[in-house]
Image: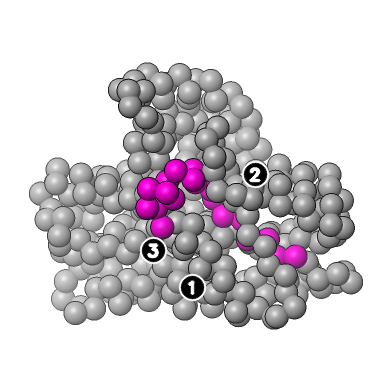
């Protein structure tokens, strides 16, 4: 390959220290694509974001304390970039690019250009497309490109990949491995696909996220044994308006009341560990499961910086840059 390709791994980012918790929350609530506010409240977005961050920070800090004082999001994405670069081989350089914390998308693009990259690929690290995540990251990339004199139309985008056969095969393999470990008990685990929720209003305005999540779950069910019970739920509700349902908490309660004793969770919209997996799924929702009589509650490990995921992403990038 004559030209050098810079691949930006677009991710949200998370607070690396407890001191970064409040400014990270503020940055999240200032994003108009992530948190939509009705007019005229949107005029007061900045002061409202500061107020929300200050109010929520103490409780959120406690959650990050459970994770060792910060999110692994940034470090994991950097590791993913290194593993992906190795999988791609000569002619490729990969960079972590965060929407809300360093290294920022603008910084990653600047570094790629300084390293001599002549072609840029924006790789969303969200398997499904959502206006709250993918669109927001691409918006930041577009702004960075304009500021740094890069033609936006020259940047190659990979905006979703949960329907890719290679990814489905990977997810199926890891799920099946965890299911086989769970058959030590007499009862086969119920497989609970827990995806990050979004407000129903986003879906009504055209966000394809719910359809893509449901399609991925349906495709995975085709790969699993017929007798395997699969359920879908949504987690991480953050506002009072209606969100996608059923919630993972309510689904666990429902399963427990049915008498289900074993549940295996697959984080359907995440490929790496962060607060939603390490605290919400592994601690908070595990307590819910046990409270309603589910004796065995476990989770399929996140792919994180595993080479299996890197090979899938490398295939996506190669196909995107191919003439």
Residue 21's x, y, as percent?
50, 30
Q: Mark 2 and mark 1 in contact (Cβ < 8 Å)?
A: no
The mark closer to the camera, 2 or 3, is 3
Magenta region includes residue 280: no
Span of residues in magenta: 190-208
Above or below: residue 113 compared with residue 98: below
Crowding around mark 2 (Cα neighbors within 10 Å: few <14, some 14 to 19, many 20+) is some
Q: Residue at x 31, y 76 (%)?
A: 318
Could you tell which of marks 1 and 2 lies nearer the N-terminus? 1
Mark 3 secondary-structure assignment:
loop
Magenta region includes residue 206: yes
Could you tell which of marks 2 and 3 lies nearer the N-terminus? 3
Could you tell which of marks 3 and 1 lies nearer the N-terminus? 3
- The residue carrying mark 1 is 167
Look at the image and tell me whether residue 22 can be seen. yes
Q: CA distance from mark 3 to mark 1?
A: 11 Å
Q: Residue at x 64, y 50 (%)?
A: 246
- The residue carrying mark 3 is 160
Q: CA distance from mark 2 to mark 3?
A: 24 Å
Residue nearest the observer in this picture, 305 or 319: 319
Mark 1 secondary-structure assignment:
helix
Crowding around mark 1 (Cα neighbors within 10 Å: few <14, some 14 to 19, many 20+) is many
């Amino acid at each position: 390959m004559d030209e050098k390709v810079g691949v930006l791994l677009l991710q949200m980012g998370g607070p690396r220290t407890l001191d970064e918790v409040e400014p990270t929350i503020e940055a999240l609530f200032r994003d108009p694509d992530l948190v939509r506010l009705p007019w005229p409240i949107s005029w007061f977005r900045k002061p409202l974001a500061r107020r929300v961050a200050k109010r929520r920070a103490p409780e959120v800090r406690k959650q990050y304390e459970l994770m060792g004082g910060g999110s692994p999001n940034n470090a994991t994405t950097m590791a993913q970039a290194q593993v992906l670069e190795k999988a791609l081989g000569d002619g490729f350089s990969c960079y972590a690019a965060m929407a809300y914390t360093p290294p920022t998308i603008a910084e990653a693009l600047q570094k790629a250009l300084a390293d001599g990259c002549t072609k840029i690929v924006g790789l969303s690290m969200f398997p499904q497309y959502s206006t709250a995540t993918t669109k927001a990251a691409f918006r930041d990339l577009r702004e960075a490109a304009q500021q740094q004199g890069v033609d936006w139309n020259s940047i190659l985008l990979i905006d979703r990949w949960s329907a890719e056969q290679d990814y489905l095969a990977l997810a199926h393999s890891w799920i099946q491995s965890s299911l086989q470990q769970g058959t030590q008990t007499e009862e086969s685990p119920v497989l609970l696909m827990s995806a990050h929720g979004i407000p129903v209003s986003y879906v009504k305005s055209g966000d394809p996220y719910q359809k893509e999540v449901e399609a991925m779950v349906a495709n995975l069910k085709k790969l699993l044994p017929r007798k395997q019970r699969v359920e879908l739920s949504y987690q991480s509700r953050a506002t009072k308006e209606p969100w996608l349902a059923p919630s993972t908490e309510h689904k666990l309660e429902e399963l427990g009341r049915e008498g289900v004793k074993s549940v295996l969770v697959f984080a359907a919209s995440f490929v790496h560990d962060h607060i939603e997996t390490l605290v919400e799924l592994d601690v908070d929702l595990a307590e819910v499961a046990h409270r309603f009589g589910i004796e065995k509650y476990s989770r399929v490990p996140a792919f994180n910086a595993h080479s299996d995921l890197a090979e899938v992403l490398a295939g996506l990038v190669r196909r995107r840059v191919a003439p």
